Amino acid sequence: MELRYLRYFLAVAEEMNFSRAAKRLHISQPPLSRQIQALERELGTRLIDREGSRFRLTEAGLLFQEGAGRILDEVAGLERRTRLAGDEGAKLVRIGFVGSMMLSLLPELLAHLTELLPETRLDLVELATEAQVQAVLAGRIDLGFLRSWVDTEGICFEPLGEEPFSILCPEAMVPAESSSLASFARLPFVGAARAAAPGLGDRIRETCAAAGFQPELRYECSQLSSVIQLVSAGLGWTIVPAFSIRRMAIEGVRVLPLPEHAALGVAYRVGPLPERVRAVVEESKRYIARSLAG
């Protein structure tokens, strides 16, 4: 089966219209229709049920759409890895990260990697957890730093350690019994948007649930730095990874340690890793383990 069949079918399935798919593929519509018909004959089953100008994917078509997407992603990743392997001077490692890590250990880790692996060029891209997983599977990034466990076929996830939590609360809002997390239950809470940081948000909710409450969410932000700014403005309290504020002096805000932790981990594709990627993974594991232990 030729790869062009997969590309043609995916274009039709995604556009749900032959004319738009043909325009996207830069071909005319009749040849595209013939290619899809040839694909169905080769497979011996209908992929599309046509009703005049409207159509829908059959059950076989839906299955083929999912598999075709994975195959094309794999081919694209193979092409990229082959080009890099064939270039002895290629030292690029593309790294994904969740935004909250830029306030935590990531800047120091990157400085350490740059000093230790001077011939390696690090290319950074900020992505939410699920977007990182998909980017790793598609070969768009080589590895990703996450704050939640990942259990996805094709992905290897290695835990790097656990970062302790801290409460941030405006001085004027701190409850009398501040040693108890439950004493914050009725206070307005400033949280990180789940779409941006699902692992961190879920872990914070689990921590509050273990104390017998769910926080009274008043504000939600996609960036941890914005969460901290709102707390600094006296608009509510929050829970953050302790390393994200260790060098901050936040006027008018009380910092209280918590015994609970947030996971840190690295995700990459299952299978042999290029040496430059393996070096980054191994050095990251050692550096973060030392940092958290210290």
Image (cartoon, rainbow, N blue to C red):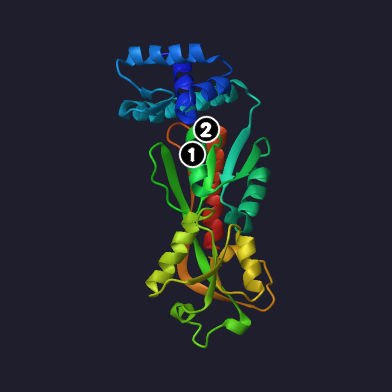
- Name which of mark 2 and mark 1 comes first in the sequence: 1
In the image, residue 161 above or below residue 245: above
Of all residues, the one furthest to the front in this rendering is 52
- Residue 25 in picture, x, y percent from top left: 56, 20
| Furthest residue in direction bottom, as rendered | 176
At label 2, the amino acid type is Gly
Q: Is residue 89 left or right of residue 193?
A: right
Decide: is 248 above or below 106: below
Residue for badge 1? 134
Residue 240 in percent (x, y) is at 55, 66
231 w.r.t. 202: above or below: below
Numbered tag placed on residue 53 in the rendering? none
Residue 30 shown left or right of residue 105 in the figure = left
Q: What residue sits 47% from the left and 35% below the top?
A: 137
Q: Amino acid at mark 1?
A: Gln
Q: Residue drawn at (52%, 15%), measured in percent from left and top?
A: 29
Quadrant where the C terminus sits is bottom right
> In which quarter of the view is residue 125 placed?
top right
Q: Is residue 246 visible?
A: no
Residue labelled with disc 2: 139
* Image height of 164 relative to 195, above or below: below
SS for dot 1: helix
Q: Secondary structure at mark 2?
A: loop
Residue 140: % across, % down: 55, 34
For label 1, count other residues whose C-alpha is less than 10 Å away and answer few (under 14), some (14-19) or many (20+): some
Q: Residue at x 46, y 28 (%)?
A: 16
Whole-number angstrom distance, CA of label 2 to CA of label 1: 9 Å
Seen from the viewer's position, the closer of residues 231 and 181 is 231
Report if the CB atoms under discs 2 and 1 are less than 8 Å apart: no
